[in-house]
Image: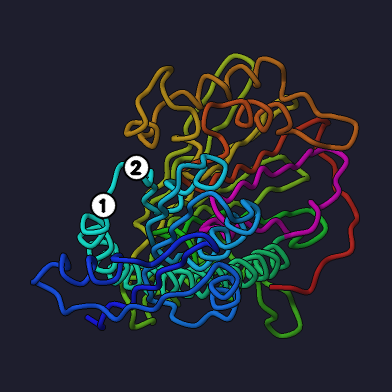
Amino acid sequence: MNLCQVIVVLDDSADAGSWPSAILSAWPRTTPRPHLTTLDLNAALAHARSGDDADAVWLLIDRGCADGRTWRTLLATLASRLSPGVVVSARSDVTFGMAEQGWVSVSGDEVTSGAIAPILAALHVRQAVLADVRAEHAALEQATAQMRRWADAVNDELQLASRVQRHFLPREMPATRSLALDVLYRPCGYVSGDVYDVRRLDERRIGIFLADAVGHGVPAALLTMALTRALVTRERRAGVSVIFEPTEVLARLNRVLCSHEDEAHRMATAVYAIMDLATHEVTIAGAGHPPPLLVSQDAMTRIETDGPILGVFEEAEFTQVSVSMNVGDSLVIYTDGLESAFPEPNAEAKHLSIPTQNHLSHLRKLAGDEFRVRSDGRVLSDLAAIIDHQSGSLHQYDDVTVLAMCVVAAPAVEACVVSEAA
């Protein structure tokens, strides 16, 4: 610890007298005797403003003759520098608020010069501790600023990643006269582990794909990009476009994922379906995914298929089933985030992420309303509104994606420009 510097300040009428010798003689023996400097009020104000002796301890002795404004200016200057001290004055207008600044204020009639010494010594010791605290605080502020800059950079990168991910999703559903198509896509963060694709395969068939990468955040989002890139639904053979069956589409995806060396970030569940617009027959294959629901006014049927999760067994086999849809029927394909989007009423926070069957009751209600198709072709508007009104919807625990197809007219072959994407 540095040698204590004590600056004694006297107003014009005060006399140092025995103050210096009394302070030195009463100074605690556990610390070295201090160096004392005696200044008048004006010299002290100039000294304080210069910033010298930042570690000094001040003793201000006011006998009531000097201008109170000058005293207050000196005290404010020292307080701004966090300099400690003792002010001996009977004037409350001079000492008001100094206790909050860490100063000791005493009346000139209540203290002796010798009693001041231990107080000054204690303030000197405390000042050294405060200096360490200030240094740590400055370091913490610097680290906080760096963390804030890092967080801002991560936020910008994640927002860019979100825009890039959405760029690879269909911008609009294929236009048909007999089928209304809609999607509800709600990531739980910036990016999503869900991915979907709806594309025209030829003049009468539409391919519908929905996958949910295992995990959350950026690793899952990166896997969805790989799934999108690896999704092959048809190929050209001898100049003829051959459309793959749903089982073949999933088998190809599975082989691509299994070829990756990183086993921890290559698994996903998926559903792929082909809708025939000429017959309204839909053929579906699944890979460890929640079964799609065929919803009519009087029934809700799970469309079960056999097939393991993608990315585990390279030679896995997948089965497919075909069902026919009538006017007013809807096919709903969703990720498991929908199962946790409707927690039990009054559920505790730790139970909000537990899957429930409540989504089925909401889908049944919507089915009773025939999945009202709005003039803009939206089918899932009511379901989106219900999710938005859920408690904690702003902090959903999983990505939610729902694809709905509603048959609104009798089957018809519809001419359409076919995308060359495969």
Q: Quadrant of the C terminus?
A: bottom right
Residue sitting at x 79%, y 53%: 204
Side of 322 where 166 appears, left or right: right
Task: Say whether residue 334 is magenta.
Answer: no
Residue sitting at x 66%, y 58%: 197
Side of 120 where 379 appears, left or right: right
Say above or below: 406 vs 139: above
**Looking at this view, is 116 or 236 the one in front?**
116
Instruction: Estimate how packed mark 2 is, as few (under 14), some (14 to 19) or many (20 or more) residues with alpha carbons within 10 Å.
Output: few
Residue sitting at x 36%, y 69%: 57
Please state the horizontal and vertical placement of residue 294, each as a whole percent of the image: 57, 31
Instruction: Estimate how packed mark 1 is, as few (under 14), some (14 to 19) or many (20 or more) residues with alpha carbons within 10 Å.
Output: few
In the rendered structure, which amino acid carries the disc numbered 1?
Thr
In the rendered structure, which amino acid carries the disc numbered 2?
Asp
Do the residues bearing badges 1 and 2 touch, measured as CB atoms within 8 Å? no
Q: Label 2: state its secondary structure.
A: loop
Instruction: Identify residue for label 1.
Output: 112
**Looking at this view, is 336 or 153 the one in front?**
153
Residue 132: which quarter of the image? bottom left
User: Which segment is the magenta one?
Assistant: 170-199
Instruction: Identify residue for label 2.
Output: 109
Q: Quadrant of the N terminus?
A: bottom left
**Looking at this view, is 242 or 197 the one in front?**
197
Task: Say whether residue 181 is magenta.
Answer: yes
Please state the horizontal and vertical placement of residue 375, each as a whole percent of the image: 90, 31
